Image: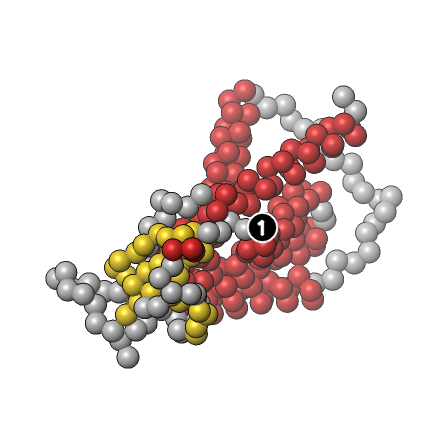
Amino acid sequence: MSDGNKLSQIIVSIVTLFGPISYLLYALYEGGRLRHFGAPVEFIQLTSFGILPVVETIHPGIILTAVVMTLLGGMKHATPIHQIRMACGVIGYVAGTVAVIATNEKIKWGFGIVAALCAAVAIVVSAGAPDLGNEQEKPAPIPKSGAEKYENSVRNWVFIVSAVFFFSMGYVAAGIKKAENQTEYWVSGDRVALAIYGNTVLLAELHGQEVGPGFELVETKTLPKPLVLKGLGPIRPAIIIDGAKPKPTQ
């Protein structure tokens, strides 16, 4: 099989999986956002989401992560000074991501400073001109035993699975962060719409700036009152004490 055919198959595979993966990550994002309010998430389906919210929320992270993975893959072919710059780019990206989705101010500032320092190093450090034609020949690889190959394979898979897990949990954390900072919501009477998926609306009891503990899944055509966009400020889940109904907060 020619290299062109292999490349075509890889591109087709990536395009085929890109859509379902994007919707799966958005489901994790929405799950994190709704769980912050103690709302149910079992009704969520991948077909519930519109295209534009998925593109705006998920794709920037995927694209930036692809850039980071490209840097990691190219580090073994780079010169030492380029490796330093690439490493700073990767560490800065991870630190910046944590700083953006973190809710703790100390964590936010700590990782933000790390990201800024890494960006400064990557920009300031000069790579210089490449020494074309003077590259040193790499020595032939040392043959590895079956046990060494197996150990390397296990190590690689542990890294891949861990990276996928933390990448996915990043979207859950981003959903929680969104829930903590969102200020505008659609409201129907005395209930707030926490999620609108097509013709389905998840309504929650609204007590001042607290929501819950009651939730209801209805169709838009059966809403008791029309939806109105209001600036409620950040809202939080209601705290129930001894089964008593939460009192409206001022």
All told, the count of numbered labels is: 1
Q: How is the image coloured?
A: secondary structure
Q: Residue furthest right?
A: 133
> Height in image: 239 above or below 151?
below
Q: Residue at x 59, y 62 (%)?
A: 118
Horizontal side, residue 66 vs residue 43: left or right: right
Q: Is residue 90 visible?
A: no
Indicate the amino acid at tag 1.
Ile
> Height in image: 228 above or below 222?
below
The 10 Å Cα crowd at callout 1, few under 14, some 14 to 19, many 20 or more, is: few
Viewer-side residue, 176 vs 191: 191
Q: Position of residue 150 (x, y in %)?
A: 51, 25
> Height in image: 3 above or below 18?
above
Viewer-side residue, 143 vs 200: 200
- Location of mark 1 (residue): 51
Callout 1: SS: helix
Q: Residue at x 14, y 60 (%)?
A: 243
Q: Residue furthest left?
A: 242
Viewer-side residue, 193 vs 57: 193
Please identify the quadrant where the N terminus is shown: top right
Q: Position of residue 75 (x, y in %)?
A: 66, 46
Q: Is residue 218 visible?
A: yes
Q: Residue at x 33, y 50 (%)?
A: 40
Image quadrant of residue 212?
bottom left
Q: Position of residue 22 (x, y in %)?
A: 55, 45
Horizontal side, residue 245 vs residue 81: left or right: left
Please identify the quadrant where the C terminus is shown: bottom left
